[in-house]
Image: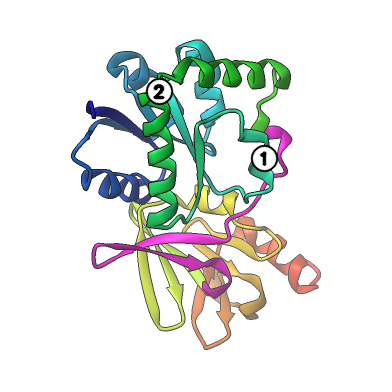
Amino acid sequence: MPVIRVLIVDDESLGRLRVADLLRAKTDVEIVGEAADGDSAVRAIRELGPDLVFLDVQMPKKSGLDVVREIGAEQMPMTIFVTAFDRYALEAFDVAAVDYLVKPFDDDRFEHAFLRARRVLALEGVERARESLLAMLSASGPATVAAAVPARYLERIAVEMKGQVKPIPVEQIDYIAAAGPYAELHVGDRRYVIREAMQTLEDRLDPNLFMRVHRSVIVRLDLVEALHRGGGGDYELQMKGGVRLRVSRSRRESLERWLGLSPHD
C-alpha cells in the first residue's frame, strides 16, 4: 500500500495525541502535521496537501465544517470527522465524511474508520466522497450542519494517565481549578491535570450542573454546601467535604440567586 499522508486537527492536545498514537503503529502512514484550530487547519491543508484529515467538528471560532467550507468540498482531502456528538445527531454527517469517531472512541472503532478510509483511497473513491460532501454543504445553506444539530455539553473529559487516555465522566468532578495554562480536575481525593482553558471548559459544561464562581474556579453545583462572607467583602464557597473555594465579586450574585438568596443577604 502507498503511504497515506495524514493531518490531525483537534483543539484538544490529548485528542491529537490519541489519534497520533494510534497512527504511529501503522507502517503505511505518515503524519504530516497537526493543527489546533480551524485557521491553522485551513493553512495546513493548503500547504501540506494531506491524503486524509482527522477533523474535529467542534472547535472555537471556526468549526470543522467551517474548515471544509473555506477549503471547498471539491478540494477537501478524505475526511474522518472526530466529534463529541452522539451517534444519532451524527446522522447529518454521514454523507459528509468517509467516517466519524465519537469521543471517547476505542481502538477498534478507530481501526474501523481508518480501514474504511484506506479502502476508499485504494479504490480511488475520493471524488465520490467529495461530491457527497459538496451536496451536503450546498443543501445546508449558509449555516453549518453543526449549528442545526442540538448543542451538546461535555459528558466526559479525556485525561492522560501513565501514557494512556482515560475518560472522566463530568458527573464525577467536584470542582475544577486553574493552574497556569492547565486545569486541575478534582474528583474525590484524586486530581487530574489537563491542558485546557477555563473559558473553554465553562462554555462546554452544562450550566445547570456547573458554575464558574471565580476566574480560576468552576464548581459542581449540587456539591455546594454554603457561602461564607469574609472580611473586606470577600466570599468563599464551602463544598461538601469541607473544601473552601474563592468566589469573585462579579460572580457572587449569580451564585446567590442559585442558592435562593437575595443579593447581599
Where on the picture, by quarter, is residue 1?
top left
Q: Which mark is residue 91?
A: 1
Where on the picture, by quarter, is residue 208?
bottom right
Disc 2 packing (10 Å; few <14; some 14–19; many ≥20): few
User: In the shown orientation, is residue 84 left or right of residue 162?
Assistant: right
Vertical relation: 204 (above or below) 61:
below
User: In the shown orientation, is residue 171 left or right of residue 32?
Assistant: right
Q: What kind of residue is marked 2?
A: Leu
Q: What kind of residue is marked 1?
A: Glu
**Furthest residue in direction front, as rendered:** 123
Front position in the image: 121 or 13: 121
On whether residue 158 falls in the magenta region, the answer is: yes
Vertical relation: 19 (above or below) 60:
below
Vertical relation: 1 (above or below) 113:
above
In the rendered view of the protein, which quadrant contains the C terminus?
bottom right
> Magenta region: which residues?
147-174
Q: Who's the residue at 27% across and 43% down the image?
A: 23
User: What colour scheme does the image use?
Assistant: rainbow
